[in-house]
Amino acid sequence: MAAQVAREVYGPLAETMDRDRIPVSREQRKQLGDLGLLGIAHDGDYGGSGAPLAHALAVIEEFGKVCRPAAFQIFEANTGPAQVIRHLATADQRERWLPSIISGDTTMAVAISEPDAGSAATDMRTSAKRVDGGYVLNGTKRWISNGGEADQYLVYCRLSDAPGAKGIGAVVVGREVDGISFGAAERLIGFRAIPSADIIFEDVFVPDDDLVVPAGDFGKLFGVFSIERLGNTTMSLAIGQEALDRTIQYVQEREQFGKQLIEFQSIQVMLADMVLQVEAARLLRDRAAATADEGLPDSLAVSLAKCTANEMAKKVTDLAMQLHGGNGLTEEYGIERLHRDAHGWAVAGGTPTMQRIRIVSEVLGRKFDQRR
Ligand SMILES: Cc1cc2nc3c(=O)[nH]c(=O)nc-3n(C[C@H](O)[C@H](O)[C@H](O)COP(=O)(O)OP(=O)(O)OC[C@H]3O[C@@H](n4cnc5c(N)ncnc54)[C@H](O)[C@@H]3O)c2cc1C
C-alpha cells in the first residue's frame, strides 16, 4: 500500500515540489496520518501500530525512492524526535504530543545544531536558565529541517552550568510562543522541498511541564538518536536503490553503437559496483534494524550502516548520472535530484566522517577526545 501511494500519489508531484521548493502540505500530511503511516513504530496507546521499527523503515524506503519530502514526514514521525518523546518523556507528555503527531495534525522537529556547534554538538550554547515555574531559553539553532514549518521543536540545550555533554538536556517549544523567530529559508542543493531554517530563541519561557530530558541525560538522548540515524540510513538506501533500479532499466533500453549499453563490459562492471554497494548498505541497515527489536538499536551497528549507506548513495547516484548520459543531468529524469538529496542525507544526522570516528572508537573500545 505504501509503495502504491508513494508512486501514484507523490511520484507525479516530486519534480515540481523539488523545483519550486514546495513542502508537503498539512492536508497531505494528514492524509499520511489517516493511512496510519506516521505511527507505525509508535505504541497503540497513542494511536500508533506498535509495529517493529523495521516496518516503518520499509515504508520510509518506498516513499524515499520517489518523493523524499513525503518520506521525510514519515521519517520524522516514526524515527525522529517523536521517538525521544516515546522513550524518554513522561506519560503526560506522551499523551499531550504523540497522538497529534501520529494523526498528522502536528509535527515535531529536532533542534540540535548551532552556528558554532555542528559535529561538535556538545559545544552548543543555547541555554535554559531556571526561573520560577520553568526555564528561560536563549540561543540560536541552525540547519533545522522543517524549521518554521513544524508545530513543535525538541530543543537540545544547556540546562545546567556543567561543561560539555553533562549540562545538556532537552525541552519542547511550540512554534507560536513569545520570543521565538525563524531565519530565512535555506536554499540547499538537495532537500529542496523540506524547509530548513535557523531558530532564534530570545527569552522564551518554557514551563516545567515541557522539560523532557534533564541535564546529564545527554547519553540517553543520543541513544534514542540512533533510531533517527536508522531512518537517515534508510533514506540513503532508498536513494541508492532507486538510482540502481532506474539504471538497470535504462542501460537495457538505451542503444549506442548498435547495441544496448549493458552489452558493453565496462558498463556491466559499473552496474555491478552499484549493486555491490546497495546490497552492502542494505545488509548493514537490516542488521542494525534487527538490533532494535528489544528497545534501542546498537549504536555501532547504526554508525556502520549510516556511514555505508550515505557514502553509497552519493557514489551510486553519481554512477547512475554517468550511465544516463545527458539525460542523467535533466530534472525530468530525476537522477540528478537523487544525487543532490544523497548529499543532504549524508551531512544530516552526523557526517560519515564522524560516524567513522565513532566506529573506530567502539571497535577499539577507546575514546578519542576530539578536543585535545
Ligand atoms: C540537509 C540537512 C539537514 C539537517 N537537519 C538538521 C536538523 O533537523 N536538526 C539539527 O539539529 N541539525 C540538522 N542538520 C545539521 C547537521 O547535523 C550538521 O550539518 C552536521 O552535524 C555537520 O555539522 P556542520 O555542518 O557544522 O559541519 P562541521 O561540523 O563544521 O564539519 C565540517 C567538516 O569537517 C568534518 N569534521 C568535523 N569535525 C571533525 C573531526 N573531529 N574529525 C574529522 N573531521 C571532522 C566534518 O565531517 C565535515 O566534513 C542538518 C544538516 C543538513 C545538511
Image (spheres, grey):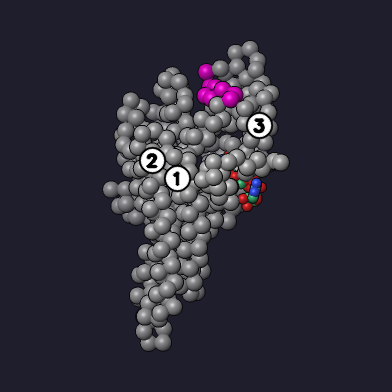
Disc 3 target residue: 164
Report if residue 28 is visible in the image: no
- The residue identified by callout 2 is 291
- Residue 239 drawn at (x, y percent): 44, 57
* Vertical order, 360 against 249 (above or below): above
Q: How far apart are marks 3 and 2 (CA)?
A: 29 Å
1 and 2 marks in contact (CB < 8 Å): yes
222 left or right of 270 in image? right
**What's the magenta region?**
209-216
Residue ID at (51%, 57%): 311
Question: Circle 3 sits in a helix, a strand or a loop, which is it?
Answer: helix
Q: How crowded is mark 2: few (under 14 residues within 10 Å), some or many (20 or more)?
A: some
* Residue 163 versus residue 362 in the image, above or below: above
Question: Considering the image in quadrants, where does the C terminus appear?
Answer: top right
Q: Which amino acid does label 3 sit on?
A: Gly
- Name the kind of residue labelled 2 in the image: Thr
Per the model, the C-alpha gap separating discs 1 and 2 is: 8 Å
Among numbered discs 1 and 2, the one appearing first in the sequence: 2
The answer to whether residue 251 of the structure is visible from this angle is yes
Residue located farthest toward the left when viewing the structure as drawn: 1
Q: Position of residue 70 (x, y in %)?
A: 42, 47
Magenta-drawn stretch contains 135: no
Which mark, residue 301?
1
How many residues crowd mark 3 within 10 Å: few (<14), some (14–19), many (20+)? Answer: some
Estimate the x, y position of residue 155 in percent, counting from the top left.
57, 31
Q: Earlier in the sequence, mark 3 or mark 2?
A: 3
Quarter-of-image position of residue 79: top left
Q: Which of 319 and 219 is in front in this view?
A: 219
